[in-house]
Amino acid sequence: MINFNGTLVSEDANTVAQNRGFLYGDAVFETVKIVNSKILFLEDHYFRLMSSMRVIRMEIPMNFTMESLEEQIVSLVKNNGLESSARARITIYRNEGGYYLPQNNTVSFFIQAVLVESALYALDGKEYEVDLYKDFYVTKHLLSSIKTTNRLINVTGSIYASENGLDNCILLNDSKNVVEVLQGNIFMLKGNVLTTPPVSEGCLNGVMRKQILKIAQKLEGIEVVEEIISPFDIQKADELFVTNVIKGVQPITKYRKKEFSIELSKALVAELNSLIV
């Protein structure tokens, strides 16, 4: 028996009592966007998920192929009537047993899916204000580049943003350099140079980050680099934007007293939608 919210219940009746993802954050996840029953950038998502599992020493089942993952996600989306436009999250956790040291490295998973209002990527035209989040810092190591279920810095940062009337916060690493934002990667345009922090700085190895790098490299007059960005660089930027696979590109319009253009963001969204259509 365990005490659950003041009531004694069977431990087997509570699905989180022995779940290592809940107890230790011993889990990884991947969020994908589905349009007309097709998972966008499926191959990139699949290989990032496999890489994340290898990093934390999970055993990858023989039948856990890209095709089987696609089938499982699309089946759920269709069952829920969301095949036209949806987001789905697959969470993979190490099976129960042990304390910090697991008794085995086998895994289980579950998938969730919800409606996404728009199949195409779009800019909403609203003001989008950000500031630095300095209560906690991202550590520069490999674990920071994968999506584990330990997202406390994102949770506390989101609370900070809400309390201060912000739309997002910029995260810093332990060298006090810009890493990413709460819900995605960050890009900075200054002149004709588009910069995003390298993964070695501790940022998430984002799927949409990869797409934007490829698209921007083909744009005439734009030089693309992966380099360290300091908070002082942000104030000198001409344009800032956030990327993730659900939103696509989200322009940052205001940082403290500085306001930014959104022209490159418009061009990138148009290129992204051409990939979908």
Image: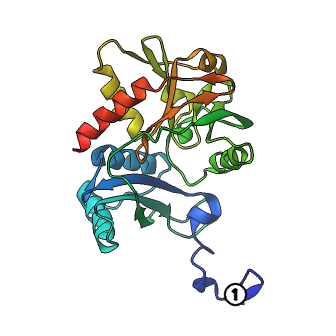
Quadrant of the image containing the N terminus: bottom right
Estimate the x, y position of residue 132 in percent, counting from the top left: 68, 32
Q: Could you tell whether 139 is left or right of 185 in the image?
A: right
Image x and y of residue 176, in percent: 68, 25
In this view of the protein, which residue sits in the foreground, 249 or 15? 249
Q: Residue at x 52, y 17 (%)?
A: 238
* In-front residue for pair 188/103: 188
> Extreme front residue here?
125
Q: Is residue 62 at least partly visible in the picture?
A: no
Percent x, y of residue 125 = 48, 38
Q: Residue at x 35, y 72 (%)?
A: 80
Q: For residue 228, which quarter of the picture?
A: top right
Three-letter amino acid code of the residue under disc 1: Met
Determine whether 141 is above or below 93 in the image: above
Q: Quadrant of the C terminus?
A: top left
Up-down: is 132 above or below 218? below
Disc 1 target residue: 1
Q: Is residue 215 above or below residue 112?
A: above
Residue ID at (49%, 43%)? 146
